[in-house]
Amino acid sequence: MARAPLTADEAEAVGAFAAAWYRGAKPSAAALPATFMRQRGIVLVIARARGERVGRWWRQEPTGAEALRSALDAVRQDLDPTERERITALEINLAHSFAPVDARADRARLANVYRGLMGIELVHEGTAFRLAPTEMIAQNLSFERALERLAERARVPAPPAGDPSVVLRLFAADQLLIELEGPTARTTLMYRGNTVVPIQAITKARAEALAAAQSRWLFTNLQPDGRQVYLYWPSRGEESTASNSIRLWLATVAMTRAARAQDDAALLERAEKNLRYNLAHSYVEDDAGHGQIIEAGTTVKLGAMAVAGLALVEHPARPAFAAPEAALRRTIDALWQPSGEFRTFWRPAERQDNVNFYPGEALLFWAALYAESRDPALLERILASQRFYRAWHLAQRNPAFVPWHTQAYFKVWEVTRSDELRDWIFAMNDWLLPVQQWESQRDFPDTMGRFYDPDRPFGPPHASSTGVYLEGLIDAWRLAQATGDVERQERYRRALVRGLRSLTQLTFRDEVDLFYISRRDRVRGGVRTTVYDNAIRVDNVQHSLMALLKILEHLPAADFRP
């Protein structure tokens, strides 16, 4: 059953045929692709009502046309007229190219990058149990979890490996979404339950629309009492109970910046309500006047205090928060050592980890203070830390370090024009650029532009990583522009646009990539974690938005090009 995927024209023909047949017409199968007509057909049709799954039908027949007709007939027969009236879209998988897979030995073929591109089938005692590629996207399933579900249905142990009575196969599928609203059905040939964003589509206007959508997500998910949603699961339509103080305080920064960029007083008020909520629920001050951001009742992180301080400094209502700002500054000052090193935790004091993050966040806070005060003593501290952490980073390089230190030192460079800071910013970002994937991902075009190095232990690809790297890279680009470094300016520009392609791909934008979402107001404008993991964590959105706001402010429209 191996065959080539359908072309866009062939998919359009299949979609037109399916829509007409579903509506009760009897169209000729002559327009259907020849390979689809000749080969044994295995077809899944899912009926959806504005994202809600109403029913699911697999059919296997001698030809694709027969299987498609049979599945569509089942939809009409199994749903009563009232239910059929609700149907707004048909999600169709035309399965093909089945191949055996061993759940234990073939881990590479079950890698995350194939989620949503390949379906999986378990056959036991003559019965086939399947999950199609679009189902894995809609249900946010890894292959491991998919196998568990299939094994549960088949009533066999999981993982089903080494059992001669169980056959596992991977399969490809042409993924069609047929939107039925209106007199003319619209067919989209999907790739991993979405459409691929071409690099040529990244224009300034597209970036402006993206920033507006992500800003709407933040404010839509800001609760009436000022609490921001930390993690939302689109497939479940549920909010997680997880939390992280650093990411939530950075969301406050992002909302303030978005409101100021839009010159929207109402949004600034809502950002202030979020700021006050965060203070009320996470800020404490001890008897010695040390302000702290408490997490999980006991933990006090350098990074959390720094980003909370940044949120206070950047909001126009800053004077109202002078006392907590000063108290947070006292605690951060107490964590700094004459060597330039920061202790990264106030409590527990013995912890000294997250060095790639927290000192850079603290330096960004200090840089914001220095940019307004021009305090020479603060500058001395910043430069001492820059030298300490330069040596630290060179001994154990990690991309997570780069954007925080880049942003901090660029703020200081704008005042001092220091050659030392200039050269270090360039050195960090020159090293970062190869972590961005491009040509190596041609076989998976929706992943192109993300930052991920599969050969080094820097962690998995993540939307928030791409977003924060772009926050630093736009400052590196501005530095290259200001110093007349044309070659670096172009390399950084290209990385920025490629990164925007990735973030655009990850953002829930339209009716196609929302095809399985019923609570669309909670999801639209949200940024997935990866193309195959649809969880929306707040830092996915706020880092992307803060990068977009800076890029839109500084990058000329003509530079939004491949």
Image (spheres, grey):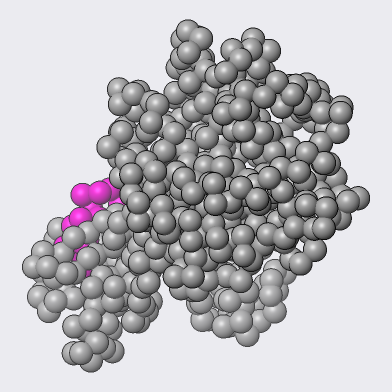
Can you give x and y, in whole percent of width and height, for residue 69 in the image?
Answer: 23, 75
Residue displayed at 80% across by 63% down: 298
Q: Is residue 558 left or right of residue 133?
A: left
Where residue 397 appears, as percent x and y from the top left, is: 74, 30
The one nearer the camera, 437 or 555, is: 555
Q: Residue at x 23, y 73 (%)?
A: 88
The answer to whether 300 is drawn above or below residue 297 in the figure is above
Give left or right: position of 238 versus 243.
left
Residue 8 included in the magenta stretch of the image: yes
Residue at point 70%, 56% (across, down): 293
Judging depth in this view, the residue of 139 and 558 nearest the camera is: 558
The answer to whether 219 is drawn above or below residue 304 in the figure is: below
Answer whether residue 426 is visible to the viewer in this image.
no
Quadrant that contains the C terminus: top left
Q: How many marks?
A: 0
Please report the bounds of the magenta region as a residue range: 4-19
Q: Quadrant of residue 498?
A: top left
Q: Is residue 45 magenta?
A: no
Residue lying at 16% horizontally and 69% vertically, measured from the top left: 181
> Main structural element of the magenta stretch: helix, strand or loop?
helix
User: Can residue 310 be seen at all in this image of the molecule?
Assistant: yes
Q: In the image, is 303 to the left or to the right of 270?
A: right
**440 versus 534 height, above or below:** above
The N terminus sits in image quarter: bottom left
Query: Of all residues shown, which one is farthest toward the right?
Result: 350
**Which one is nearer the viewer's eye here, 368 or 36?**
368
Tell me where residue 151 sits by quadrant. bottom right
At which x and y percent is residue 257?
A: 45, 43
Residue at the limit of the structure toward the top, as seen here: 484
Left or right: where 141 falls relative to 364: left
Closer to the camera, 301 or 285?
Answer: 285
